[in-house]
Image (spheres, grey):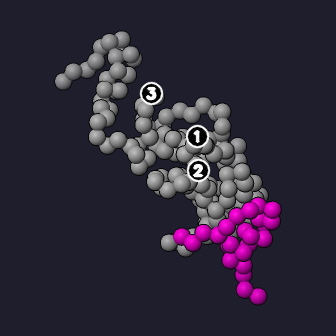
Amino acid sequence: MSPMSPLERIAKEFDGVPHEIVDVADGCPCLRVEREHLRMAILRLRDRCGFETNTFLTAVDNLPEAPRFEATYQFLSIQHSERVRLKVTVYENDCQLPTITDIFPGVAYLEREVFDLFGIRFGGDVEQKRLYMPEGYGHFPLRKDFPHRGIEPDKLYREWERRHAGGNTYRS
């Protein structure tokens, strides 16, 4: 009897979780789930399939396609020496996903990064804070419609320095 592949093992535990298998270039097992089933899928991966670590969360902007965004989560099972990815689509007019920080606390930084660079919110009403860009920055730099010309990023930083330095700014 040959051992089960990661996808066979996961499919056995995903009863009741609608999903589809996605072929990816690097051959890593990958499933697509809808947003409303994301948390259930992640809990099944952790609790029934032994994927105890989230290794990354990122997103892609597919503009002009709809749905515009696709978020990708990757998980690691040390016990089985396997990785698996979950993909979930995100529509521009409802640009949010549920947070999974209660399931994998270490993902909080990654959720903030995806919010800061793509504008995808996590946790519904949870306040999102910028990670790289200053608060008040009106753009999300990894979106395909990011205005590469005409932004004056130093202006925002100079305003922030004036507010926080009591009007004293460094001049070279």
Magenta-span inclusion, residue 17? yes
Residue in the foreground of this view, choosing between 160 and 118: 118
Image location of residue 62, percent across then percent down: 48, 55
The secondary structure type at the circle numbered 3 is loop
What residue is disc 1 on? Answer: 121
Secondary element under disc 2, as helix, strand or loop, is strand
Question: For the residue marked with disc 1, what is the amino acid?
Answer: Arg
Mark toward the viewer: 2 or 3? 2
* Residue 52 seen from this side: no
Query: Badges 3 and 1: C-beta atoms under 8 Å apart?
Result: no
Give neighbour class at mark 2: few <14, some 14-19, many 20+ (Cα, 10 Å): many
Image location (x, y in percent) of residue 64: 46, 54
Question: Measuring 28% from the left and 40% from the top, which residue is drawn there?
Answer: 149
Which badge, 2 or 1, comes first in the chain's sequence? 2
* Disc on the earlier residue, 2 or 3: 2
**Does residue 158 sit above or below 150 in this rendering?**
above
Q: Residue furthest bottom?
A: 1
Q: Quadrant of residue 10?
A: bottom right
**Disc marking residue 136:** 3
* Three-letter code, disc 2: Val
Q: Is residue 101 left or right of residue 116?
A: right
- What span is colored magenta in the figure? 1-24
Mark 3 or mark 1: which comes first in sequence? 1
Question: Gap in Å between the C-alphas at discs 2 and 3?
Answer: 23 Å
Question: In which quadrant will I find the C terminus?
Answer: top left
